[in-house]
Image (cartoon, grey):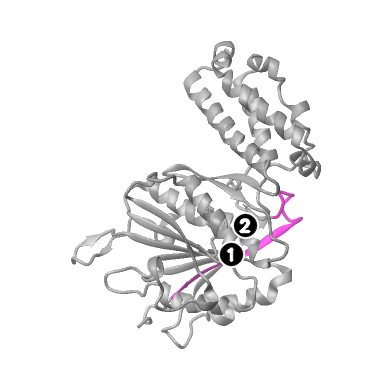
Amino acid sequence: MTTIHPPTSHLPPIAKITTYTSAQLLDALIYLRLLYNPEVRGSRRIRAGLESIGAPSRFNDDSDIIRSDTFERSYAIRWLTALIARMEDIQESTSVLQQPQVHSEMLIQQAASLLAICAGVAAAGTVQRVFSFESDELGRIEIQLTDIPLDNHDYTSVGGQTWGGACVLAEMIVEHPERFGLGDTPFLGNDGCLGRGDLRILELGAGTGLVGLTVAKLLAAMGNRRATVVATDFHPSILANLTANIDANFPAGDGGDMITVVSHFLDWSSFSSSGSGVLSEPFDVILGADIIYEAEHATWIKNCLKSLLRCQGSSHPPSIFHLVIPLRPTHTFESSTIENVFQIAPQNHTEPAILSKETIFCEAHGDDIGNDLVEYVYYRIGFPTSGCL
């Protein structure tokens, strides 16, 4: 486990910042990202030969103390500001910059992103996070989010935090978009011609919006599909933060006329099949991560899916609900309700059912594999081939 030192003793001195090489400055930026953009617990998938989500840090417990130190954070902000302001001098004095323009842009981008994160941490209880997922074809998909404090008086406010299941699902989508119905597979349009058409994507229990925003950024990078992404939640403060996160990643007009991202209130317990507004029509893809923590949730969600999940037809490919949930020891009964409510190969083919099930293991805190694991189950749920009236 690595010992972390305060920014005041670890970073290159501000007065001598121009004497350091680009590699040394980049190392300093990586250190600050590890400190002020901590990884989400249970987000490191165990995969041979592939890097995990987030930085591979193994900091000691002092990192939380240092992270909450306002003086150290203020110093980090001053250091980042100085780095950006003196970038031209750094270019002139650093001989190792064989491609100054490329390297300087990277340093500036990293520093600017960290400034936003460090400034956000100043708000009590909030955490600014930057998530990056790598696509072989499209490069890096980056999302900036704000986590807000839990309301100790209301358990439904857990959506203010980004949970590991959302990280896992988002990464899986970026790696294999075709597996989630986001590829280029054509289908028969209303005019009888083959086309790709507009996609309608729904996230249930969106929380901070990581999954939905990842999908939106991915589709924007593809640039060949019109899509509407609807991120839904229930708690007022969660919806407000979700809307702010959407605005931060898709400022007004940033998605052009191709990608539309909106937040919307959805109470599973009282959902009406008639729906309203953006929920009045079924969706092509529905996503959910870490949203089963009460015994009734699976039943409520199934009721929603009967209306929101698009039936397979001649003009559309099958619509799938992709669900990732952790198997928590404290919520074993709640987790088991998924397979009780959504049966595998049910007799009633007009009901949404489990089409496939996959187990995923993640490191809990970046400890050595095998010491502390988080187990997830990934379900694909939809109408059986012959079902859906």
Camera-nearest residue between 250 and 356: 250
Is there CB contact under 8 Å for labels 1 and 2? yes
Q: Quadrant of residue 153?
A: bottom right
For badge 1, the amino acid type reads: His
Q: Residue furthest bottom?
A: 347
For badge 2, the amino acid type reads: Gly
User: Looking at the picture, how far across and down is residue 23, in whole percent?
Assistant: 62, 23
Q: Crowding at label 2, few (<14), some or many (≥20) Cα neighbours within 10 Å?
A: many
Label 1: element kind? loop
Q: Which mark is residue 144?
A: none
Q: Crowding at label 1, few (<14), some or many (≥20) Cα neighbours within 10 Å?
A: many
Camera-nearest residue between 20 and 126: 126
Image point 57% across, 76% down: which residue? Answer: 298
Task: For residue 197, say whether it is visible.
Answer: yes
User: For the residues carrying marks 1 and 2, which lies nearer the camera in this image?
Assistant: 1
Say above or below: 89 vs 80. above
Residue 381: say if magenta. Answer: yes
Image point 65% across, 56% down: which residue? Answer: 362
**Magenta range:** 364-382
Q: Quadrant of residue 283?
A: bottom left
User: Looking at the picture, how far across and down is residue 103, in whole percent?
Assistant: 52, 24
Q: CA distance from mark 1 to mark 2?
A: 9 Å
Label 2: element kind? helix
Image point 54% across, 59% down: which residue? Answer: 239
Q: Is residue 348 left or right of residue 298?
A: left
Q: Quadrant of residue 313?
A: bottom left
Q: Is residue 214 left or right of residue 326?
A: left
Task: For residue 283, say whether it is visible.
Answer: no
Task: Quickly name the residue at label 1.
Answer: 235
Task: Quickly name the residue at label 2.
Answer: 160
